[in-house]
Amino acid sequence: MEEKSPFKTETYKRIFSKFMADGESTRADEVLVDMDEPRGAKISLLPAKHSHYVATCKAFAATTTAGKLLVAVFDLYGKFYECYQMQLHELQNVVAKKAFGGMNISFYGKTQHGRLIMQMYIPNHQFGTDLKEQKNHLRLFAEHLSNKTVSIKITDEKVTDKQEFENVTANKPQYGEKKINPLQDIFDEIIRMSDVLEENSIDFIKCKSGVSEETINEVENAFLINLPEDYKNILLLSNGLSYQGTEIHPIELVRKVEIPNELEWNQYYIIGSYIGDGSLILADSKGGVYYGDHVNGIEKTTFMEFLNTWLIDSLKDDLAENGL
């Protein structure tokens, strides 16, 4: 007999009822989302992925008639963890973008635990649930989240991986329209090398359009930190890069390390990873950069040393090995 999914309508109704005032109700826009727990707590561990350190979880999200956003977070097995409350009129930088099979929605806001970043992936379909109107709920949720939320039309059109990459590439910042970025030449060389690899059907860099200085400042203010300057300069050009296990995290994924009983680690912030085995690139609150792995612990470095060693040199090696 097939096991029943724990993510059912009665699940979120029971949780939400505890956080709503008399006469307050949801606005019929409940959606089941995939997300990272906003405070970075490790509430789920995926089977057979022991190095998995991102707090992947499920959450029900809905707006209410009293102008609130409720996000009830569960682990991957349906155990309730936390319900966040946010005032809709206080949400900032709400971004809704069409993604493969659904929508990505991200925003900042103040919760009962302080100011947090929320990033959600909302599939058009949720198999194994009884949310039969998921697509309609998704559309309503995006509309209710903020009067400035959706800048693109939500459609049922399927987007292929290639189309998604082309859409992202088309949104790269136009060089010359902004002030000179000290890493512009290095970034252009990274893109040139990745383009050569892609033309020869070899794995390529995943690029996103850059973020604004205002967005970076808001994250720094939220965490009360100064991010590394070279990391911020890369973000202005591309909000995240990845290549063969090495990742420069987008600004939305910057988070504090939270490992129980590990005081040394918990003073740092995660800005990327390398090797693909859970080894991390860390930053302290003053802009210092460090390697962090389970073998050597925490070692001081620079962002440019990381960029050259784990990204640029890897691209050059792959070009050489393939006679390019």
Image (cartoon, rainbow, N blue to C red):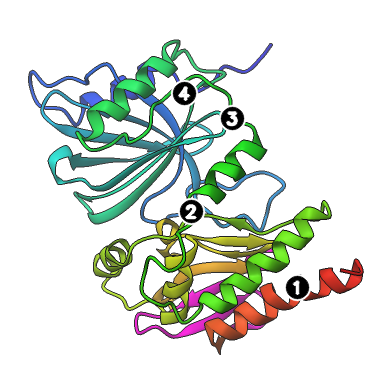
What amino acid type should be assigned to the residue bearing mark 1?
Ser
Mark 2 or mark 4, earlier in chain: 4
Name the mark nearer the viewer: 3 or 1.
3
Q: Quadrant of residue 9?
A: top left
For image coordinates 76% across by 55% down, the residue present is: 198
For image coordinates 47% across by 75% down, the residue present is: 231
Task: Determine whether the residue tagged by mark 2 lies in a helix, strand or loop.
Answer: loop
- In this rendering, is residue 295 above or below 18? below
- The residue identified by callout 3 is 159
What amino acid type should be assigned to the residue bearing mark 2?
Lys
- The residue identified by callout 4 is 7
Task: Please give the label number shown on residue 52.
Answer: none
What amino acid type should be assigned to the residue bearing mark 4?
Phe
Q: Quadrant of residue 4?
A: top right
Mark 1 or mark 2, earlier in chain: 2
Mark 1 or mark 4, earlier in chain: 4
- The residue identified by callout 2 is 42
* Residue 221, position as x, y percentages in the image: 24, 68
Give the Cα separation between the discs numbered 1 and 2.
Answer: 31 Å
Name the mark nearer the viewer: 4 or 3.
3
The one of 22 and 28 positioned closer to us in this rendering: 28
Task: Determine contact: label 2, label 3, CB under 8 Å.
Answer: no
* Residue 24, position as x, y percentages in the image: 12, 21
Which stretch appears magenta? 274-298
Task: Please give the label number shown on residue 314.
Answer: 1
Task: Determine whether the residue tagged by mark 3 lies in a helix, strand or loop.
Answer: loop
